Image (spheres, helix red, strand yellow):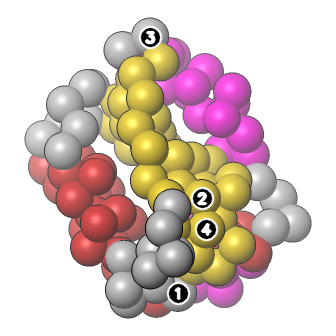
Amino acid sequence: MNDNEMVAITRDDRDGVDVIQLDGEVDLTNADSLLAAVEATRSASVVLDLSLVAFLDSSGIRAIDRGHRHLTADGRAFYIVSPPDTPVDWTFRVAGFSTGRLAASLDAALARAASAE
């Protein structure tokens, strides 16, 4: 991550599941990059790991929702890692985000993705 970026986005393949991991802060300045990363995936299941995210604003929530809609329209599954008692978890709860796609850990999200296939 350079001085001008607030979030680092990495992508990995875990046994056929695309895992996107974010590290830093997600806001208006980089929400489009988050959405682009989700839309660039090709696997049947996608996991968005937010366990290292320190801040998530409404632009980030909107990008995640758009990514979810994009994947759902393609018939693909989407899981979000949002560990309990983190800033991201708090943001999802306050925003009223559906907990059906949230997982407490990457391992839990990958297990759910594996059972969905």
The x and y percentages for residue 59 are 39, 86
Alpha carbon distance from label 3 to label 4: 26 Å
Q: Position of residue 51 (x, y in %)?
A: 69, 53
Magenta residues (range): 90-117
Circle 2 sits on which residue?
Answer: 23
Residue 91 in sight from this viewpoint? yes
Residue to which mark 1 is pinned: 57
Q: Compared to 56, does 81 lie above or below?
A: above
Which mark, by number, is residue 15?
3
Q: Residues within 10 Å of mark 4 (few under 14, many from 20)?
A: some
Residue type at tag 3 = Asp
Residue 5: percent from left, percent from top: 46, 74
Q: CA distance from mark 3 to mark 2?
A: 22 Å
Which badge, 3 or 2, is on the more N-terminal residue? 3
Indicate the amino acid at tag 1.
Asp
Mark 1 in CB contact with mark 3 (< 8 angstroms): no
Q: Which mark is residue 24?
A: 4
Q: Earlier in the sequence, mark 1 or mark 2?
A: 2
Q: Quadrant of the C terminus?
A: top left
Q: Give me the residue at 37% from left, 30% from top.
A: 18
Q: Is residue 99 above or below residue 73?
A: below
Name the element at disc 1. loop
Secondary structure beneath dot 2 equals strand
CB under 8 Å between discs 1 and 4: no
Residue 78 located left or right of residue 99: left
Q: Find out whether residue 111 is within the magenta segment.
A: yes
